[in-house]
Amino acid sequence: FAAAMEFFPEYPPAEQVMMYGIFGGTPEYLRAVNNDESLEENVTRTLLGRDGGLHEEPENVLQRELAEVDRYFAVLKSMAEGNRVQNEIAQAAGITDSSVGYYLDRLSELRVINRDYPVTVDPSRSRKGRYTISDPLFRFWFRFVYGRTARYEVYGDDAYADLIDPALPDFVSRTFEQLCQRAVLYAYGDEYRFVEEPGNWWDGSGHEIDVVAPTNSQTLLLGEAKFRQSEVGYEVLSQLRDEAQLVDWTPDDGGEREYEFALFSRSGFSQSVEEAATKLDNLRLFTVEEVVRLVTA
């Protein structure tokens, strides 16, 4: 992320996160960015139009590496639309659950996709793995570009505003989570030694926490990251504290665990959350500006 910022240093922090969430960290893709243009202008010029410099990039890369490219594209399109477990990916892609594993394994070998696990479990013993597309540009292309070029041409100058801009905060939220996971290493590094890389946690009942970082003491750090265009309210903190009890983790010494809570927000915090932060010793609040500063320092 820090290296990518050199390509668009003049953007406000929230837009830097969005630029990185779309173009990623590959220098070839970043060189297509014009720092004098807006986010909308860069995306429209490089990706949406048929003559855009990156318009066919993911397709060209994958066609050089893969046979049966239509099947792989269907799998990646399914993932880009939010399907992350094998049977859901297969169903949306129109491929049988028994055969989709072959395509997922091949894409994993090429490092086009990753299989992630809850940070507190042993991947070799867990069936909770979820798949994600590794490169942000590939994720963006399969979510917004693949099969939609004609639609953008119909919308003309309004294509970005009508079809992409409303969905962008949710799309970029995954990138923001990853940056927040990285930020805690610097924000809390003088207080704790982390025994695992911070990551996500989820269970089989729909509970999920954006930032989970086990330490070598009795403390488990937990956080929620919101990239939406509204303040983080007290309900987010309340839910985080409730779900903290569900995380499957025990301190190395077997003692009673303690918690550190962190909230990360693009658009600030409600008064009730800010008041809670002044009263609770184990709660810290981070704006998007602070997250960017921490990961680029």
Image (tube, rainbow, N blue to C red):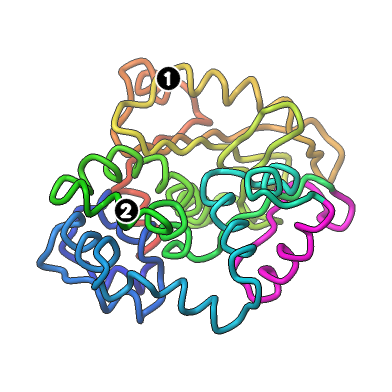
Q: Which mark is residue 276?
A: 1
Q: Amino acid at mark 1?
A: Ala
Q: Position of residue 197 (x, y in %)?
A: 64, 57
Report, in whole angstroms, how far the alpha carbon at label 1 lies from the one at label 2: 29 Å
Point 41% across, 38% down: residue:
264
Q: Amino acid at mark 2?
A: Met
| Span colored in magenta | 98-126
Return the residue nearer the eye: 296 or 39: 39
Vertical order, 30 against 240 (above or below) = below
Task: Determine whether, in the image, residue 99 is placed left or right of residue 72.
Answer: right
Looking at the image, do the residues carrying marks 1 and 2 touch, with CB atoms under 8 Å apart? no
Give SS at disc 2. Answer: helix
Residue located beneath label 2 in the image: 18
**Numbered label tally:** 2
Q: Position of residue 35 (x, y in %)?
A: 15, 69
Which of pointers 1 and 2 indicates the residue nearer the eye?
A: 2
* Residue 187 in view here: no
Vertical order, 39 against 229 (above or below) = below
